[in-house]
Amino acid sequence: MQTIISIKNLSKVYDSGFNALKSINLDINTGEILGLLGPNGAGKTTLISTICGIVSPTSGEVTVDGFDIIKDFRKTRSIIGLVPQELTLGSFDTVWGTVRFSRGLFGAKRDDAYLEELLKDLSLFDKKDSEIRMLSGGMKRRVLIAKALSHNPKILFLDEPTAGVDVELRKDLWKIVNVLKSKGVTIILTTHYIEEAEELADRIGVISNGELLLVEKKAHLMETLGKKQLIVELKESLSKVPSSLDKHNIEISEDGMHISYTYIVKDEETDMSEVLQEITNSGLHIKDLKIVQSSLEDIFVDLVKEK
Amino acid sequence: MNLMAIKVIYLNEMMRFWNTLFQSVASPVISTALYFVVFGSAIGSRIENIDGISYGLFIVPGLTMLSVLTQSISNASFGIFFPKFTGTIYELLSAPVSFYETLIGYVGAAATKSLILATIILLTANLFVDLNIAHPIWMLSFLVLTCVAFSLFGFIIGLWADNFEKLQIIPLLIITPLVFLGGSFYSISMLPPVWQKVTLFNPVLYLVSGFRWSFFEISDVGVGVSLLMVLLFLSICIAIIAWMFNTGYKLKQ
């Protein structure tokens, strides 16, 4: 797959001395959705602000579509759209006025037909003559997306797009993101919500304390780092796990009616048939079985804790 | 060059002017009329002619400069400060727009607004006094240069300020006293010799003097010196802005 954004040894130290990015290396592929996960202050916003030109890097190199973000800033910025985290809009501007302003700012020629279509896609067309201050928070978020897409960018940065947004709008925004992906737009999404990354992203990057801990395909990440738990419901209550099962690190529930066995999917030492056999051999009577997969959130929490 | 960006920044700034047209126009018209009523008629009628010019007529260039300077600074400083204050500056910083294109858009709009206001003030003054301009080209040149130079200065203040207090402090505490003490309402020849020398350090004197010369062919300093001083001030402002842009001062982290 072709790389559209290449980041090499990118570091950022603010004037205060805060080291926000520590030698980040990352390649982002054309047409993918990359989810950047990380706690507050991890460096997610600094990373995307640096690529977009809002923050100056201390060292390192970033190329977008093969062009350097500093030397060829016109070429790189003209194909990038940014939806910021905060609802930063001119209160007295109209929706139409602000979207047209954005298009012009990015050097694109006037194209009212495209902008009309864009506003329709974002369910904003009937509000096009409304002043921004009259809109709800959700509508303002849509306006920010419209502004970011006004010049038809190939890359879209969404910085916490659903922070403080209700569930309905969040689902709407997810639909919009999927439509953009189907049109070939590369999307970089920073989020606190694991559910969001799990739903949307092709690959997941985890940032903590300015370091990129890992970047993996979502499915691969879930497969390799994800844990599964076999929960066995027993016919009779148990007070203690039989000693013959000690080697499998099996836990017992408070009521003694369930035992659980946690394992890593890709762990070659895991032999489920052997475990089940030993449970049966220990004299326990199985009533039911259930397998629970750990979420991306569990993986994320484990990774950040390890660091 | 991103001409489209310059155009939208310029038009967006001008739109703000049109949206508040009444207050933009009413304020200078009312204050000019008040100055003429108080200084031109009430007090001016008891003041002797200055170099053969009636006092009401004499104060027209100074009065125009007073408004041009304050409005240029106010418009340009507010124009760039407001996006910083609201956070919408992110869009400007992430757009394929050079700092110089940004400057042309904002300063161009601020200077245009000041030119419009100067025209309104001169038209208002013409209702009170019989205004004849001896050197219209020079008058226009001084006016345009002053509008641009002080819009650049306002832009510097807007970049530097990180709160509304800072935005107001320089126009209020430095510019207004300089304008009042720069011969806007009197000829420096009326001052004691020591204060005449001190006034020569006031840059506004050269603007008012040159501008007044273009109307009445009378001046406190030579017109060439006035022109040089305006150009010098313009160059200093451009140099400071170039430094601010190159270092990202108060704009980029």
Image: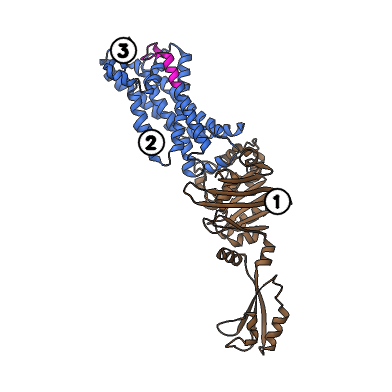
Give the quarter of the image for residue B74: top left
Q: Looking at this view, name the residue that lies furthest to the top.
A: B52
Q: Is the magenta stretch mostly helix, strand or loop?
A: helix
Left/right of residue B249 with respect to residue B181 in the rendered view: right
Q: Which chain is blue?
A: B
Kind of residue at badge 3: Ile
Q: Which chain is brown?
A: A
Which tag is nearer the camera, tag 2 or tag 3?
2
Residue B252, compared with residue A34, is above or below; it is above
Instruction: Give the secondary structure at mark 2.
Output: helix
Q: Do the residues labelled 2 and 1 touch (CB within 8 Å)?
A: no
Q: Can residue B119 be seen in the rendering of this structure? A: no
Left/right of residue A89 with respect to residue B126 in the rendered view: right
Q: How crowded is mark 1: few (under 14 residues within 10 Å), some or many (20 or more)?
A: many
Instruction: Give the secondary structure at mark 1.
Output: loop
Q: Magenta residues?
A: B213-230
Q: Mark 2 points at which residue?
A: B168
